[in-house]
Amino acid sequence: MQPENASQLPPIRVAVAQIPGSQDPSTESIAGNAHAIRAEMRAAREAGARLVQFHEGALSGYPSKKLMSGSGLDIIGEADWSKVAWGVLDREFSGICELARELGIWVVLGSLHRFSRNRRPCNSLLIVSDRGQLAGRYDKRFLSFTEISHMYTPGRRAQTFTVDGWTFGCAICIEINYPELFLEYERLDVDCVLFSTYSEDSMFGIEAQGHAAGNSFWVTFSPPTQGAEAVPAGLIAPNGTWIRQANNSQPQCVIVDLDQNAPEAEKSVKCRRPWRRAAREGSIYREHYAPE
C-alpha cells in the first residue's frame, strides 16, 4: 500500500555521538564538554554526515540533583541555578554554532536553557542549522519527580525540523516511557526521532526499538559514554532492528545512512506505516463491522 502523497527522499547520512557526560555545570566541565562536542562534529563531517546528535546535557552537563541543591549536598531541595557557569555556557555554545557554520553540518545537542533568574531552566535539545543558527529548541516535557519538584520547567510541545527533505523530531531520556509522544511524532509525519539520554537503563534500548517498529520510523539513541555499557549509541530502523551501534564505550560517532529503500526500511515505510494510519482512522473497517 503506497499513499498518494508519499515522497521518495534521497538517503541522508547522520552521526550519533557518544561522548563523556558530566554532572557538574562548572567552567572547567562545560569547556571540556564543548571540546569533546567539537571533536565529534569534525569527525562526523569528515565522514560525510549532514547531522550530528549528542546526548542529554551534552554541553551544560546533566546537573546532579545533590550538587545543585540549595539546601546542601545531603538534602535534595530546590536547585540553586547560580551554580551554573552561564557565561561560559553561552560562549561555548556560540563557538559550536560558528563551527557548525564552518563545517556545514546540523547539530542537535543537550543543554540547559534559561529564561530568567526567577524561573527554572528547561532541560533541552538545541538544534543548530548548517548555517550556524539556532533553528529550534526542544524542551523536555515529561520530567521525573525530582526534576519537576526541584529543578526544571517542563516543555509544552513537540519539536520538528527538516534537513534535506527529512523531518526529524526530538525526545529526551524518560520520555522513552511515553508512547503517546512517539505517536504524536508519527502523526506529525516525522521520519526519524532523535532520542538523547543520560540514562544507564538497558530497557530504554528495547523501548526505542518498539517505538521504531510500531511507528515505522527511524529512532536514534545517543547516550554518554557512561551509559554505553547498557545501550551503546546507534540507530534503529523502521522495522525495529539496530542498523548500527558503537562497538565499545569509547568516545565516537556512529555513522548511518537513512535510506527508504534499504531492506530494513522499505516495507515498514512504504507499506506498514500507511496501512496503520488507515487502520487508526478506521473507515476501512466500518463496512465490515458485525451488527451490535
Image (cartoon, rainbow, N blue to C red):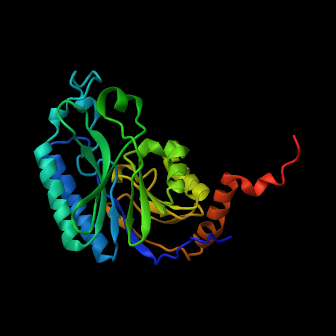
Residue at screen point 21% across, 65% down: 132
Vertical order, 217 against 69 (above or below)? below
Question: Vertical placement of 260 versus 116: above or below?
Answer: below
**With respect to residue 98, does 119 lie above or below?**
above
Q: Residue at x 56, y 76 (%)?
A: 262
In the displayed orientation, state which residue is furthest to the right.
291
Quadrant of residue 18 in the image? Answer: bottom left
In which quadrant is the C terminus drawn? top right
**Which one is nearer the viewer's eye here, 164 or 23?**
164
Where is residue 147 shown, x and y percent of the image? Answer: 35, 32
Can residue 145 be seen in the rendering of this structure? yes
Foreground residue, 116 or 257? Answer: 116
Task: For the N terminus, give its image quadrant.
Answer: bottom right
Q: Measured from the top left, where is residue 190 in percent x and y?
A: 48, 60
Where's residue 209, x and y in %? 55, 55
Q: Relative to residue 70, is residue 17 drawn left or right?
A: right
Is any part of residue 22 visible from this angle?
no
Identify which residue, 167 or 226, lies in the foreground.
167
Query: Does 189 sit left or right of 138 as displayed?
Result: right
Q: Is residue 99 left or right of residue 110?
A: left
Q: How many marks?
A: 0
Specify whether 240 is left or right of 138: right
Residue at the location (17% across, 33% down)? Answer: 117
Residue 241 location, quadrant: bottom right
